[in-house]
Image (cartoon, grey):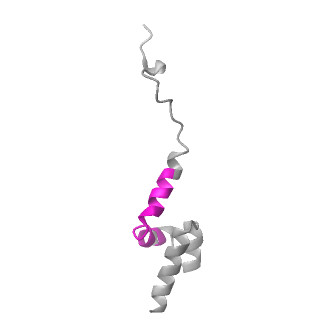
Amino acid sequence: MRFHDLRHLAATLMLGGGADMKVVQALLGHSSLLVTGDIYTSVLPDVETAAAEAAATLVPRAPRDTAVHTSCTPTG
């Protein structure tokens, strides 16, 4: 196994374990988050899914049993 393979494995495991992308970028010495993200988010689709789900939890949702939104009905 080459050194580069070990480096790649370490970064993949860090991201898979929940490490912040900025931390991994700094450890690897990448010039930007784009470089790190382009390489490693395609390796770990679960990382992308987890990030999207975490963002979705921040979006307020209306109760499911609401048939009509009263703010959208005409007043007259």
Pick the quarter of the image with the N terminus: bottom left
Please, which residue is most extreme toward the left here?
A: 42
Q: Is residue 47 magenta?
A: yes
The residue at the point 50 percent across, 30 percent down is: 62
Residue at image coords 52%, 76%:
11
Left or right: residue 30 compared with residue 68: right
Residue in the foreground of this view, choosing between 64 and 55: 64
In the rendered image, residue 25, in percent from the top left (x then y), is placed at 54, 73
- The spot of residue 42 in percent (x, y) is 39, 68
Image vertical order of residue 32 relative to residue 75, above or below? below
Residue 46: x and y in percent read 45, 62
* Residue closer to the observer: 55 or 75: 55
Residue located 48% across and 72% down the image? 36
| Residue 31 visible within the image | no
State the image coordinates of residue 13 (x, y, percent, origin top left).
52, 74
Q: Is residue 22 above or below residue 6?
A: above
Q: Given the current orientation, which residue lies at the most extreme bottom position? A: 2
Magenta stretch, main secondary structure, is helix
Which quadrant holds residue 45? bottom left
> The C terminus is located in which quarter?
top left
Q: Which residues are magenta?
A: 36-53
